[in-house]
């Protein structure tokens, strides 16, 4: 694997998507010196079963980022409702444009 960029933005729809889908690639990129940032669009609070804290999945994602070597300063978790991204598509686009700047 050859990485051309030293700065990587990992996009994650939900709190476990990027770790499960690209955790190995991200770990290798970090080992090669990349500065990884993560943008997660939903903290999935509506999906948390009764009896669990509302920030359970947010905390799990933050812990996995730390395990991978990603600074929590580089992790941003938004609160778009699960399965409703299409209703919020302009706001999602606005977030992508803002983070690009």
Image (cartoon, rainbow, N blue to C red):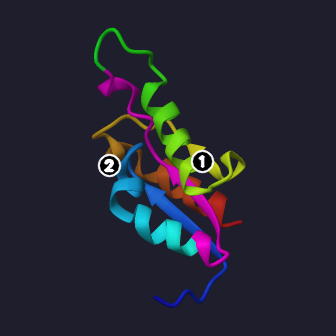
- Highlighted magenta segment, given as a residue range: 30-48
Check the image and report above or below for 58 versus 23.
Answer: above
Q: Earlier in the sequence, mark 2 or mark 1?
A: 1
Residue shown at 56% from the left, 60% from the top: 96
* Numbered circle sitting on residue 66: 1
User: For the residues carrying marks 2 and 1, which lies nearer the camera in this image?
Assistant: 1
Quadrant position of the N terminus in the picture: bottom left
**Direction top: furthest residue:** 51
Q: Residues within 10 Å of mark 1 (few under 14, many from 20)?
A: few
| Mark 1 residue element | helix
Residue shown at 60% from the left, 47% from the top: 66
All told, the count of numbered labels is 2
Quarter assignment of residue 4? bottom right
Q: Nearer the viewer, residue 79 or 28?
A: 28
Asked if the magenta segment contains residue 90, the reply would be no
Q: Residues within 10 Å of mark 2 (few under 14, many from 20)?
A: few
* Numbered circle sitting on residue 86: 2
């Amino acid at each position: 694997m050859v990485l051309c960029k030293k700065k990587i933005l990992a996009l994650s729809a939900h709190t476990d998507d990027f770790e499960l889908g690209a955790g190995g690639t991200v770990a290798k990129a970090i080992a090669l010196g990349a500065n990884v940032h993560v943008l997660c669009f939903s903290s999935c609070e509506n999906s948390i079963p009764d009896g669990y804290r509302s920030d359970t999945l947010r905390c799990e994602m933050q812990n996995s980022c730390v395990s991978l070597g990603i600074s929590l300063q580089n992790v941003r978790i938004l609160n778009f409702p699960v399965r409703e991204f299409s209703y919020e598509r302009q706001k999602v686009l606005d977030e992508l444009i803002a983070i690009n700047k």
